[in-house]
Image (tube, rainbow, N blue to C red):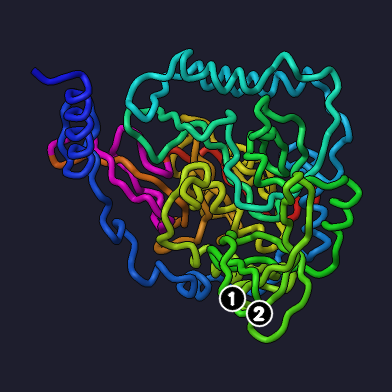
Amino acid sequence: MLSNTQMLMRWFILFCFSLLFGMTSHAGEVLTLAAPSELPGVTREMKTAGFWIGRHPSPDQLIMKPAEIVKFNARTRGAGLVEDIAGFPPTYEGGKLKAEITNAIDNLKGRKLYQKDLSPAGDAFYSQPIANIGLDFIPTTVDVRFGLISRTADERLLPTMLALNAQVGDVDFDEIQNSSLEIGTAVAILYASQDGHWLFVHDSFASGWVEAEKVAVLAQADLKAHLKRKGFVVVVTPKVDVYLDNKLTKHLAAVKMGTRLMQKSAVGPVVEVILPERQADGSLLMVSGFLSREDVNLGYLPYTVRSVYRQAFKMLHIPYGWGDMYGEQDCSRFLQMIFASFGIDLPRNSASQAKIGRLVAEFKPNTPMDKKLAAILGGSPGLTLLQLKGHIMLYLGEVNGQPFAIHDIWAYHEKGPDGKERSRLLNRVTVSDLDLGKGSDKKSLLERIVSVREIIADKR
């Protein structure tokens, strides 16, 4: 007779085979298959920036000048969608902090989530990280400290690297993962875990727990002075390697598109930047880092449609990463990286991203499809965000009256020849039309779009 452990392992192996080969073991389970390399309605030409640039009437027109982008970002901050960490208040209300941390815990505990061993997460799972937080030790008034991220850091909803999944074995979706922070990111430090290994921080776009060993602490005045340095470079490739020597041999880390680093010098094919280094006592030491000149721009890129298309298509086929898992990016982070190349601050999640810029249209569940289609086609190609519940895309333009988008997507649903619902796994940045998913229970992208917004200056 098999032991419980052997039975569990056998079940897990069967589960893995069902994902790989499309088997179903339970009634109602959705079959998962790989998506075709070329999606329906998409030609090979459509998978290049040049195709869409060539169809745009004015790809090189400047959409917003630098001063207009500054005002755009100020409006976003004024709406509470992005925080100014350099201007963060020196003290923070303890009750507000406690509520923020408690809400995250309650949201997780209120869901049916599963551990790595496939068992449901119960009190035994939550007791350790909650005890490590020490909610009762949060003071009435918190003295805020400030820091710079010195190594790429995962931002977590609990002070733990243990994962929880919404579905059994769904390891690519860790529900505790909130985001990730690149080297040089400014943070406000509000609290430390009881063991000292975790810090609860606010960055410009989100909040959560990061490992203390990846944060270098400095005074707020020094943070402001650092961020006001005149020379900076912006990463314009999906990822660029950072080295500690100008021969580019001593590798330190890789940083993502849109990351801004303070420039020290630029000589030939190499750019020298200023990097934060955490010393043994947690304080900051500035050191030199070196990047390939071809991977960065000196200052922000000009905000034109041509540049948006080029940045977006550099990301084509790059894997999806929920909450930046595995060093990748999800749908909202994909857009955030593109627009950061121009100095435009998009919020971190899709719901917040759909609150900025100029509103073109909002839709109710019963909005006729022809009205939706007309509103989308009225948006500015390359500058328009299409929001769905839990997803967001960049509108590319139309071909024969059919709108197309580029987006970072995990999967879509369709009806199989037998009439049963099945999932097609994409797991990458892709170009698709808005009929993707049509006829499925989940519905097409077009049917699910709830708002259309242009990332342009709102003159109101």
Where does label 1 land, which residue?
248
Magenta-span inclusion, residue 422: yes
Q: Nearer the viewer, mark 1 or mark 2?
A: 1
Q: Position of residue 331 (x, y in %)?
A: 50, 47
- Closer to the chain start, of discs 1 and 2, is 1
Residue 371 visible, this angle: no
- Give the residue at x 26% y 56%: 36
Amino acid type of disc 2? Val
Contact, mark 1 vs mark 2 (Cβ under 8 Å): yes
Q: Position of residue 69 (x, y in %)?
A: 77, 58
- Give the residue at x 60% y 56%: 337
Residue 138 position by quadrant: top right
* Residue density around tag 2, few if under 14, some if 14–19, many if 20 or more, within 10 Å: some
Q: Which segment did they paint magenta?
A: 418-446
* Residue density around tag 1, few if under 14, some if 14–19, many if 20 or more, within 10 Å: some
Above or below for 86 versus 316: above
Amino acid type of disc 1? Leu
Q: Position of residue 95 (x, y in %)?
A: 78, 17
In the foreground, 329 or 423: 329
Magenta-span inclusion, residue 57: no
Residue 357 visible, this angle: yes
Where does label 2 land, which residue?
270
